[in-house]
Amino acid sequence: MFAIGMLALYILLSGAEHSHAQQPAAVDTSRRELVVGIKQTPPFAIHAADDEWQGISVDLWRHAASKLKLRYRFVEEPSIGSLIDGVANGKYDVAIGALTVTGARARVMDFTSPFYSTGLGIAVPASGMLNWMPVIQSFTNLGFLQAVTALLLLALFVGFLIWFLERRHNEEFGGDIKKGLSSSIWWSTAAMTRRGNVDYSPRTVAGRIVASIWTVMSIVAIAVFTAAVTSSLTVRHLQGSVHSVNDLQSARVGIVKDTSTLEALKQLKISFHTYETPQQGLQALRAHKIDAFVYDKPLLAWLIQQEFSATLEMLDTTFEPQHYAFAIANNSKLRAPLNIAILDATQSTWWKDVIARYLGSRIN
């Protein structure tokens, strides 16, 4: 009987311990109201006309706060920097919006488990927009100038070779050096482009061999050069100068100041112009003051869809992975219960509905 009693007691205690482990850690909020810092960053935090807040982050926070029975109030901040400072100095218990987890931020505050993972996106002028700037830039491109220089040097070399071989046997290439070289260089240039009307040609065997080789080589060289330039100008005119991450190295790039995008582009050694707001950056892109605008991909997709859908578009690329989370103070007692509530929420069909409602199928 004693053994049976001890076994029953063990089972009872084990069950109680297991039940306790399944419950989120309790948070004592009965004595005060949490202050939640927030910054408008659609579609994660949207300040509606009726002074209510909505968005991906807001809906998730309300869901978690309801589960944990938290009392709170929102306080709006004008910038990400002031939001981070508010958490770091204890002004806010939690900060929500479109906050990405970075090493620099983690040194001054803590984060909950990430609830959304994405990366940086690139906005460019919409395909088909009339923009001659990329075409003009093509003519000053180093590769284009190198190709033109190579053709000119070849024409000069062949002209000099023809003059050297023909100067004593052909009066058209004879005379003083100035007259002979100018005639031979003009002949080689006309032969290369097949556009000049030249009545004279080499007469010596060696000169005619060089002329024959040059004629064949120049046909191939001009054909390749023309095809490359035509293709480049067509692509740049229709698609702009940026259509991949690698093109950012030689493009005029815009970003929002004091965001994680700044450090990401610095690491990639990409120069950039900064703007106070993403709207200002996208307006500069639409006015062709910059070639591309880099920003958090879901925020960029939302802004373009809402305000710039007729003039701008996003490239189908994502780089520099980013993770969104709530910011909390270091050693905050909210961390454990919030993590559990966030994990439960983001693994549910409710979360899928939230993402679909704000982002649809435009972006992962």
Image (cartoon, helix red, strand yellow):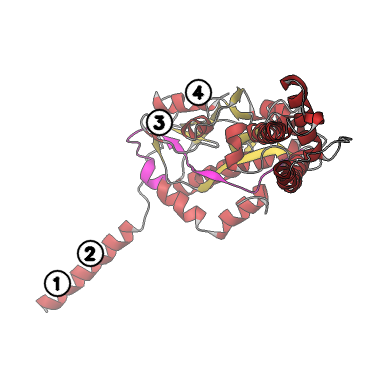
As drawn, 339 above or below 28: below
Q: Is mark 3 on a helix, strand or loop?
A: helix
Q: Which of the two discs, 4 and 2, sits closer to the camera?
A: 4
Read off the residue under disc 4.
Answer: 82
| Cα distance between the residues tagged 2 and 3 | 45 Å
Residue with the most extreme left position: 2
Marks 3 and 1, the one that precedes in the sequence: 1
Which residue bears the numbered disc 2?
A: 13
Q: Residue at x 64, y 50 (%)?
A: 363
Mark 4 closeness class: few <14, some 14–19, many ≥20 residues within 10 Å: some
Q: Quadrant of residue 44?
A: top right
Which is more toward the observer, 74 or 163? 163
SS at badge 2: helix
- Sequence-wise, the earlier of marks 2 and 3 is 2
Callout 3 touching callout 1 (CB < 8 Å): no
Residue 313 is covered by the magenta coloring: yes
Q: Which of marks 1 and 2 is nearer the N terminus?
A: 1
